[in-house]
C-alpha cells in the first residue's frame, strides 16, 4: 500500500526507507541500494536490522544506529 500526500510517499514498509527519504531530502538510486541491503540483511539474519514497535522507533534506528556486520553468530543456521 502506497499513498501520497503533498508530494510525500508513505508506505507500510517503513523499515525499508533510506535515511534520505526519512529526512525528506533529495535522493537517487542509492535509496534503492539501501532497501536492497536491508532485504539482504533480513534474509541472512532472519530479522530486520531496525525492528521496533512503531515507525518513530524504526526511523530513529535508521537515522542513529550504526550496524555491526561482522558477527556471524547472528546469521540464521541455514546461512552459516
Image: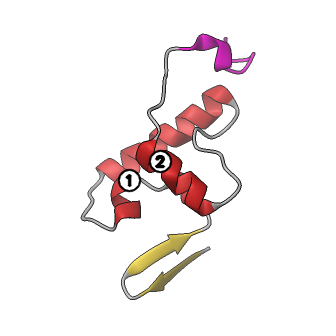
Q: Where residue 13 sits in the image (x, y, percent)?
A: 59, 60
| Image quarter of residue 77 | top right
Q: Where residue 66 sits in the image (x, y, percent)?
A: 44, 33
Label 2 sits on a secondary structure element that is helix
Residue in view at x 51 percent, y 41 percent: 38
Determine whether label 2 and label 1 are within 8 Å by CB: yes
Residue ranking furthest to the bottom:
6
The one of 23 and 21 positioned closer to us in this rendering: 23
78 part of magenta stretch:
yes
The relative height of residue 27 versus residue 52 in the rendered view (above or below) is below
The relative height of residue 80 versus residue 63 in the rendered view (above or below) is above
Label 1 sits on a secondary structure element that is helix
Left or right: 77 as drawn, with respect to 34 = right
Query: How is this picture coloured?
Result: secondary structure
Residue in view at x 43 percent, y 44 percent: 64
The one of 72 and 29 positioned closer to us in this rendering: 72
Q: What label sits on residue 19 in the rendered view?
A: 1
The residue tagged 2 is: 62
Residue 51 visible from this viewpoint: yes
Q: Where residue 9 sits in the image (x, y, percent)?
A: 45, 75
Residue ranking furthest to the right:
77
Decide which of tag 2 and tag 1 comes sooner along the chain: 1
Left or right: 17 as drawn, with respect to 26 = right
The relative height of residue 75 versus residue 1 in the rendered view (above or below) is above
46 part of magenta stretch:
no
Quadrant where the image shows the C terminus? top right
Magenta segment, which residues? Answer: 71-80
Q: Where residue 16 sits in the image (x, y, percent)?
A: 52, 52
| Image quarter of residue 22 | bottom left
Judged by its main secondary structure, the magenta piece is loop
Separation of marks 2 and 1 at Cα, in angstroms? 6 Å
Residue 13 visible from this viewpoint: no
Amino acid at each position: 500500500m502506497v499513498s501520497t500526500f503533498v508530494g510525500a510517499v508513505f508506505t507500510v514498509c517503513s523499515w525499508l526507507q533510506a535515511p534520505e527519504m526519512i529526512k525528506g531530502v533529495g535522493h537517487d538510486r542509492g535509496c534503492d541500494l539501501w532497501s536492497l541491503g536491508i532485504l539482504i540483511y533480513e534474509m541472512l539474519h532472519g530479522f530486520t536490522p531496525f525492528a521496533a514497535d512503531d515507525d518513530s522507533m524504526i526511523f530513529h534506528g535508521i537515522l542513529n544506529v550504526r550496524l555491526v556486520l561482522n558477527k556471524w553468530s547472528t546469521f540464521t543456521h541455514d546461512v552459516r
